Structures are given as C-alpha cells and as structure tokens.
Amino acid sequence: MALGMAMSIGGWQMDRLEIRKIHPASIPGLVPIVLGGLLIICAVLLLRSTFKSDEDGDALIMSGGSWARLAITGALCIFYALGLVGWLSYFWATAVFTFAFCMIFSFPVDGDLRQKGIATLGALALGVGIALGSSYLFQELFLVRLP
C-alpha cells in the first residue's frame, strides 16, 4: 500500500507539460498514478482477505499464512530481479520465474501422475503466456525497451 501511495504521489507531482500544450490525458504521471491507485486497491483487498473469524467470532489475523511461504516468495522475487533479469532476456527470465513460482506453490505433491502432468503443463503455459503478454505490453504499447 505504501508503494502505491508513493507512486500516486510521485505521479501527481510530475511536470504537467502544459507549456507545450499537451493534452491533460497524456501527462507523464498518469501511468504511475493509475498503477499506484491499483496497487492501493489490491493491498486493501489483500489485507481484507487475511482476516478470518473463528467459531467465537474473534478475528484471526493471517489465518493459514506461513512465514516460510513468505520467505520463499521473497527469495524467488529477489532471484528474479537480481539474478534472472539481465542474465537472461526479459521474456525468458519472466517465463522461468512464473513457471518456478507456479510449480513451487501449486504442484500437487501427493497427486497422481496425471495431476502432476496437468500442473506442470499449466505452469508452463502460464509462464509463457505471462512472458508473452507482459513483453508485448511493455515493448509495443508502453514503448519500453526491455533487457
């Protein structure tokens, strides 16, 4: 939520370029404002989803959560940002990261061979799909050069 607030405030404080007669909808800070707002909304929804009640109606914070899963997620994200991106192209780094994330958190360890195969193919399809979609979005629509 703090990151979303910082992005929104930073986007709001960016120059408006009014002196160049640029349309208000194309201000440079519009994307950070929108992304910051979306991050704030997602943070509120995520926080809301962590609250559960027990039988007595007492709120349980982070019910079912795990510090180990949080640590694994953090380690994967740091490995993606500092290890994969730059060593591999953005497309392959994103595909590998997404595939690994799906395999770690949704692979049916106790499932039969068919379930494991479906989970692996699903993770592979998701990894390639996310990599293709985000590469296209950034390169073609946002005109950002990717590593």
Image: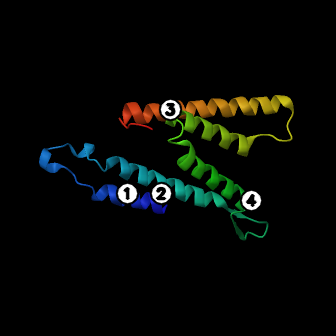
Please say if the residues under marks 4 and 1 sit with CB atoms less than 8 Å apart: no
Q: Which residue position holds label 3?
A: 133
Query: Dot 1: few (<14), some (14–19), or many (≥20) neighbours within 10 Å?
Result: many
Q: Which residue position holds label 1?
A: 8
**Which residue type carries mark 2?**
Ile
Please say if the residues under marks 1 and 2 sit with CB atoms less than 8 Å apart: yes
**Which residue type carries mark 3?**
Gly
The image position of residue 97, as x and y in percent, is 61, 41
Coloration mode: rainbow
Query: Dot 4: few (<14), some (14–19), or many (≥20) neighbours within 10 Å?
Result: few
| Residue at the spot 26% in from the left edge and 44% down from the top edge | 25
The image position of residue 60, as x and y in percent, is 71, 67
CA gap, disc 4 and disc 3: 32 Å
Q: Earlier in the sequence, mark 1 or mark 3?
A: 1
Q: Which of marks 4 and 1 is nearer the N terminus?
A: 1
Q: Earlier in the sequence, mark 4 or mark 3?
A: 4
**Which residue type carries mark 1?**
Ser
Q: Which residue position holds label 4?
A: 64
Instruction: Please state if 26 lies on the left or on the right of 129 as rendered.
Output: left
The image position of residue 68, as x and y in percent, is 72, 58
Name the mark on residue 40: 2
